[in-house]
Image (spheres, rainbow, N blue to C red):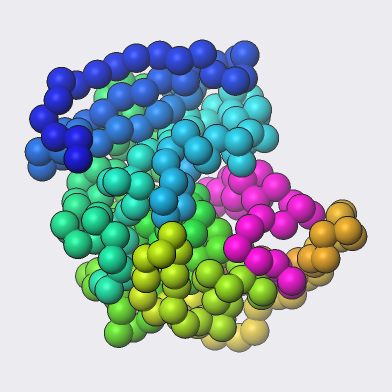
Amino acid sequence: MQRLFPLFLFCLIAVSAHSQLVSDSVLIEGYYRTFHFLKPARPKASLVFVLHGSGGNGLGTRNGAAKLEAIAPAENILLVYPDGYKKYWNECRKTAQSAANRENINDNAFFDAMIGYFRKNYRIDPQRVFAVGTSGGGHMAYKLALTMPEQFRAITALIANLPDTNNLDCPEKRVAIPVLIVNGTADQVNPYEGGEVKTNGISLGLVRSTDRTFRYWSELAGYQREPTKELLPDTDPTDGKTIERYTYKASGKPEVTLLKVLGGKHDYPNDIDVYLEAWAFFKRQR
């Protein structure tokens, strides 16, 4: 437990030569919460949180987001890799057995403080704040959309479904925002058809199916008919996966899109870069 140690700020040389990775922390209810970020090219940058999965940490997600990092200067993105509490997020699954959930860690205050930090120190565009999360990080992205949608323009959840209705302990503001979901049909950790999630020997409770998760966000946005369906190019025939895109998009309504990875497990498909796909989705949300 990191508790009441001096605030620190240090710099590391990033793998990318174009920028420095900076690490800092904010004090939240007696705990110093850490995060790592790449400085933007100029003011009014888009702020993108990249959220690690259960059992991970912020720096561990950098390799997966390498292509997004490469375009960050040109796109004026301030990329942030926050650290969960003891490697987990206190998201919306009430029966989750992680320390973050059991101790009811205030992750909303953490994100609120980080947004304030970047508004003050880097003059980011407060209308262009996004989150993309994997697995447990995808659940944290859902929580941000459920509980503090006024601070986020859009979110992307990778290999994550919403908690089932009897396993949801977050107060829902029920404000429609753009949501992109990327889930695999053969995922045995986050079951596509719903069920219990287990990882690192910890039960994280029951989740809805992907179809129900997709329907939650699309109905919240006011869509009733069937979504537009598109088969994406199979750029890697050797990975045994293909991707179907289902999209709800209409003037005056938030876009809600599902990338259904046929044959996809609890991993990323090779046919697309999920972080570039998330950024393309975010850019569309003007």
At a point 56% along the width and 63% down the height, the residue shown is 159
Query: Residue 115: in sight, yes or no?
Result: yes
Residue 44: name its quadrant. Answer: top left
Q: Residue furthest right?
A: 237
Can you give x and y, in whole percent of width and height, for residue 12 in the image? 45, 15
Foreground residue among 17 and 45: 17
At a point 29% along the width and 60% down the height, the residue shown is 98
Q: Residue furthest front?
A: 201
Residue 110: name its quadrant. Answer: top left
Can you give x and y, in whole percent of width and height, for residue 243 in the image? 76, 66
The correct choice, above or below, for 279 with respect to 117 in the image is below
Can you give x and y, in whole percent of width and height, for residue 8 in the image? 24, 18
At a point 66% along the width and 44% down the height, the residue shown is 276
| 116 sits to left or right of 35 | left
Which image quarter holds the N terminus?
top left
At a point 70% along the width and 47% down the height, the residue shown is 273
Query: Residue 128: in sight, yes or no?
Result: no
Q: Is residue 235 magenta?
A: no
The correct choice, above or below, for 47 with respect to 273 in the image is above
Tag count in the figure?
A: 0
- Find the magenta span and give its range: 260-286
Foreground residue among 90 and 230: 90
